[in-house]
Image (cartoon, helix red, strand yellow):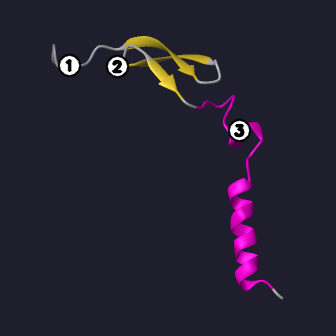
Amino acid sequence: MKEGIHPKYYAVKVQCGCGNTVETGSTKESLRADVCSNCHPFYTGQQRNIAARGRVEQFNRRYGSK
């Protein structure tokens, strides 16, 4: 490999908004994440269907049986 063309590689702790930390490697010195697998609704099973409910109600109002 050529010398001097590769970025420095750091061992970093990724900090999530929920407080969870994960150790990984990166070319950046520090990383922050908004959501992780511990707090993401898809992985926790707490999906929020509020937006989907509104769309279903709107569909039923337009095309539903009267």
In this view of the protein, which residue sits in the foreground, 7 or 34? 34
Give the magenta range.
Answer: 35-64
The answer to whether residue 18 is above or below residue 51 is above
Q: Are marks 2 and 3 in contact (CB under 8 Å)?
A: no
The alpha-carbon separation of the residues under discs 2 and 3 comes to 27 Å
The alpha-carbon separation of the residues under discs 1 and 2 comes to 17 Å
Which amino acid type is marked by label 2? Thr
Percent across and percent down for residue 61 are 74, 79
The answer to whether residue 33 is above or below residue 65 is above
Q: Quadrant of residue 59?
A: bottom right
* Marking on residue 31: none
The alpha-carbon separation of the residues under discs 3 and 1 comes to 40 Å
* Marking on residue 43: 3
The answer to whether residue 29 is above or below residue 47 is above
The quadrant in which the C terminus is found is: bottom right
> Which mark is first along the chain, 1 or 3?
1
* Marking on residue 27: 2
Which of label 1 and label 2 is nearer to you? Answer: 2
Mark 1, Cα crowd under 10 Å, few <14 / some 14-19 / many 20+, is few
Q: Which residue is mark 1?
A: 1
Q: Secondary structure at mark 2?
A: loop
**As drawn, is 23 to the left or to the right of 66?**
left
Task: Determine if the magenta segment contains residue 45.
Answer: yes
> Which mark is first along the chain, 3 or 2?
2
Percent across and percent down for residue 5 are 17, 19
Which amino acid type is marked by label 3? Tyr
Which of label 3 and label 1 is nearer to you? Answer: 3
Mark 3, Cα crowd under 10 Å, few <14 / some 14-19 / many 20+, is few
Q: Quadrant of residue 38?
A: top right
Q: Name which residue lies at 16% across and 14% down.
A: 4
> Which mark is first along the chain, 2 or 1?
1
Task: Determine if the magenta segment contains residue 51.
Answer: yes
